[in-house]
Image (cartoon, rainbow, N blue to C red):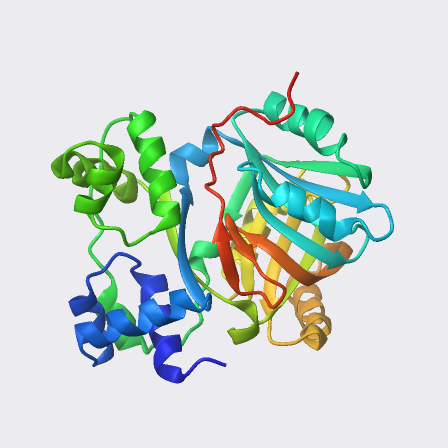
Amino acid sequence: MLSESDLKLVDALQTRPRASWSVLGQALGIGAVTAARRWETLVSRGQAWLTAYPGGELVAQLALAFVEIDCAPGAALKVARSLAADPHVATIEYVAGHCDLHIHLVARSLRDLADYVLHRLSALPGVTRTRTAVSPRLFTEGSRWRVRAISPGERKALVSPASRTSGALRFGELDRALILALGEDGRASAASLAVELGVGASTIRRRLDALLARGAVRLRCEIARPLSPAPVTAMLWLRVPPDKLETTARSLAMLPEVRMCAAISGAANLMLVVWLGSQHDTVPLESSLAAKLPWLEIVDRAVTLRGLKLMGHLLDDEGFAAGHVPLDFWAPVPGTP
């Protein structure tokens, strides 16, 4: 496990990922240099990292699907490593459940999703079968999850006032490049981003402020799963009456264990991803859900045995960050004729 001070730093960065080191240090009662040094150590060891990806209005313009993959015996890891290099595959998990691999797939359109499954995924050696569930609505995702190591007062000191925005978001190539650059280093300064992208720092600040204010780019701080207070990932496929889907999803999204809640197509119409302290916690969680939401039916379940990619970051055998693949969901689908 990480030290309490390191967990507090991770929590602070989950609350305000781009806060200055002086602001973070003041909230946590440590020096700015100390805060920066601790973070650099965590990142260098692959123990924690920042990632960036489109959110808000931009997500509504993209197509999201969850694909279950059956593999030939002994082929699962080889298939996963091949898929991990693709910019459209955000997350890959090797699971104990009704499939071998479970991936989060994002592309520009439903046609691009179909092209990926038909021409890239199905043609990959070792893949024997795939099942795809499209998600028309994402109710919550991992940027809301916290390690819950800082006090309410410390968290309040870190919350910045909400910025007001108006008008439609004009998303262009510079915004796309900015999101991809932040995926590599979510705390990169405007000056360094300006040099990398070849534009003025003032332009970078203006576009970044606009993207962040509208939630069009999401920044989140991750922690290596073996070091997390909730190291176990479980997935639940739920069936909810259509007239209760919205209220049920909103209730589930408020649970501290929930990392993601998404509406999906298929016999189950809701998928839940939870982070738990132990695999044994799945039983009391299901009992609690049944008691609080009796109309909810658990159709299926799975537990992650090994994570191989998490929102663009490649994970080693122990679950530590070992590389990064830009999440360029707008790129052409590989293998398309």
In the image: residue 57, left or right of residue 99: left
Name above or below for residue 170 compared with residue 14. Answer: above
Residue 34 x %, y %? 23, 77
Question: Which quadrant, please, contains the C terminus?
Answer: top right
Total numbered circles: 0
Question: Looking at this view, is 45 or 119 the one in front?
Answer: 45
Residue visible at 79% across and 50% down?
Answer: 99
Name above or below for residue 305 compared with residue 66. Answer: below
Residue 18 x %, y %? 26, 56
In the image: residue 185, left or right of residue 209: right
Q: Quadrant of residue 235?
A: bottom right
Residue 167 x %, y %? 24, 27
Question: Looking at this view, is 119 or 159 the one in front?
Answer: 119
Q: Quadrant of residue 151?
A: bottom left
Q: Quadrant of residue 221?
A: bottom left
User: Farthest residue toward the right?
Assistant: 73
Residue visible at 62% across and 21% down?
Answer: 111
Residue visible at 69% across and 37% down?
Answer: 133
User: Farthest residue toward the top?
Assistant: 337
* Residue 182 shows in the view: yes
* Residue 295 shows in the view: no
In the image: residue 206, left or right of residue 267: left
